[in-house]
Image (cartoon, helix red, strand yellow):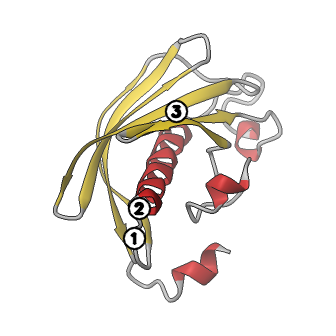
Amino acid sequence: MTSAVTDLIPHRPPFLFVDDIVSESPDGLIARRTWRAEEDFYRGHYPGAPITPGVLLCEAVFQAGAVFLSRQASAQKTELGAGVPLLAKIHDVRFRNPVFPGDTILIEVKRKDVLGGFTMMTGAVRKPDNTRILTVEFAVAWKTPSGSKDVASQAS
């Protein structure tokens, strides 16, 4: 994991699922994640035949989307303000192949539209050999969650 990722989003281990940024463009980016066999969730998700939970694969996509939004704000010299990236909508998730401990995935996110403070995005996960893992559409807003006191200090 590079500090570039942790400098951009508030997520931290054990709930950080983006290791580094592979490439980026004005409308999206590609990130990478290697799933480590010692990660605790594998002990309970099909013991003896562990599979990476689909919800965590989706979370990796959503985190890559937050990395993209943060990078875009930096490039445009705009402030996102206080708060964190909050998932507003998930649509049309399609799982195609499983991910196992030790697998590396590439996570691609693209911005589709920005409307009323929400960024609509698409995401896809594949293996380096181009095996498709999942696709998803989602929306993100940068907000301060209700009940949150000081988000910035909590993320450190």
The residue labelled by disc 2 is: 73
Instruction: Name the foreground residue: 132 vs 72.
Output: 72
Q: Which amino acid, mark 2?
A: Ala
- As displayed, is residue 95 above or below residue 9? above
Label located before the other in sequence (2 or 3): 2
Q: Position of residue 123 (x, y in %)?
A: 39, 34
Residue at image x 50%, y 89%? 149
Residue drawn where x is 62% and y is 44% of the image: 18
Q: CA distance from mark 1 to mark 3?
A: 23 Å
Q: Nearer the viewer, residue 4 or 99?
A: 4
Number of other residues with Cα within 10 Å of mark 2, as a class: few under 14, some 14 to 19, many 20 or more:
few
Q: Residue at x 16, y 63 (%)?
A: 116
Q: Earlier in the sequence, mark 2 or mark 1?
A: 2
Left or right position of 89 against 26: left
Q: Give x and y (percent) for residue 12.
A: 67, 60
Q: Is residue 15 visible?
A: no
Q: Is residue 81 above or below residue 60?
A: below
Residue lying at the far right in this picture: please name it. 38
Judging from the image, what secondary structure is the residue with disc 1 in? Answer: loop
**Dots 2, 1 in contact, CB < 8 A:** yes
Cα gap from disc 2 to disc 3, whole angstroms? 20 Å
Q: What amino acid is found at the position of numbered circle 1 in the picture?
A: Leu
Tag 3 residue: 107
- Tell whether 105 sits left or right of 123: right
